[in-house]
Amino acid sequence: MNSQESGRTVVRALEELRVHPAVEEIGLGAFLGDLNQAARSQEHLPPTEPIFVTQTGLILAGFGRWRLAAVHKTPTLECVEYTLSDEDALRFMLALHRRRNGWNPFIRIRLALQLERALEQRALINMQLGGKHKGSATLPKAAHIDVREQMATIAGVGSRNVSKVKEILERGHPRIIDELLNGSISINHGHLLCRIPLSKQVEALTEEYCDRAASEVEREVLSRHDLLGVDAPTVLDTLQKQEVLQPGSVVIQLSCRKRSVVLLGEDIQAHIRQSTRLPCHEIQAPTEEDLA
């Protein structure tokens, strides 16, 4: 066995390896990055990096390669083994993935929160040994803030985001949490959504996605056409007159968006361009012949 830094290179049977309970609780969202990377690098042999594990078989890094090995029924894997407790294993994973940007901030905070109870117990013992807070089983506010700061440092984030994620986990709809896991929305965005009633959160998220998709369509449409450069009253007046001359030619569709957008056909665009080149007193309403 060859040593590598503080770990040692070993060969482990596939069935000996398992996921840390804290990571398993999160589910597939914690593995997507590794799975995609492993799938892309299947043809590059030998593997550039071994799987990192603890002496008890907890996987620290290399989840993608481990899953691919299971799919291909590979009996053994080369690993780098570290002697770590479950708590230290979680710290190791967070430090490693923080450097590699392997997990987004929400995942890192959610995992760091698994250390909260141990950090609080340690803080309470230290205070009692120092002669403070004797006989009490609860921490003062300042100690809770210090524990929050420690979790933020472990996760590599700001302390306010730790509080926001705790609130999200308490009040957030599972769909909101899934979107945070895959990085589709930010922690701040998720926290704002969780301030509204649980029954309305998915509806609000859907409306935002619809609005975002519609905005992308608008940008695509506008990028292909010149703006008329005319005011809204002129456009609305032209549409009204066209509808009088040709009932049903103006189609109105309802949307869940908070902003209304009018898309003009080429016939109305041509008429407005023609009209706006004339002095205001000479602008005429479109005739049936114009609209034919």
Image: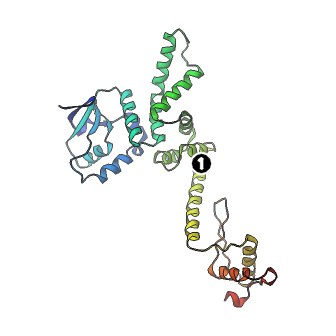
Determine the image quadrant of residue 223.
bottom right
Nearest the eye: 254 or 139? 139
Q: Is residue 191 left or right of residue 4?
A: right
143 in relation to 129, above or below: below
Q: Residue furthest top?
A: 131
Q: Residue furthest bottom?
A: 289
Q: Is residue 26 left or right of residue 248?
A: left
The residue that label 1 is drawn on is 201
Which image quarter holds the N terminus? top left
Nearest the eye: 123 or 47? 47
Could you tell me which residue is drawn at 51 percent across and 11 percent down?
Answer: 128
Could you tell me which residue is drawn at 54 percent across and 43 percent down?
Answer: 187
Which image quarter holds the C terminus? bottom right
Determine the image quadrant of residue 17.
top left
Could you tell me which residue is drawn at 25 percent across and 35 percent down?
Answer: 80
Give coordinates of residue 256: x percent, y percent.
Answer: 63, 60
Q: Residue furthest right?
A: 281
Give coordinates of residue 124: x percent, y percent.
Answer: 51, 17
147 in relation to 95, above or below: above
Give coordinates of residue 48: x percent, y percent.
Answer: 25, 45
Q: Could you tell me the amino acid type at mark 1?
A: Gln
Q: Is residue 229 visible to the viewer in this orientation of the structure?
A: yes
Q: Residue furthest left?
A: 1
Give coordinates of residue 45: x percent, y percent.
Answer: 21, 50
Assign a secondary structure to mark 1.
helix
Mark 1 closeness class: few <14, some 14–19, many ≥20 residues within 10 Å: many
Could you tell me which residue is drawn at 55 percent across and 24 percent down?
Answer: 144
288 in relation to 197, above or below: below
22 in relation to 205, above or below: above
Nearest the eye: 276 or 199? 276
Q: Is residue 201 left or right of residue 106?
A: right
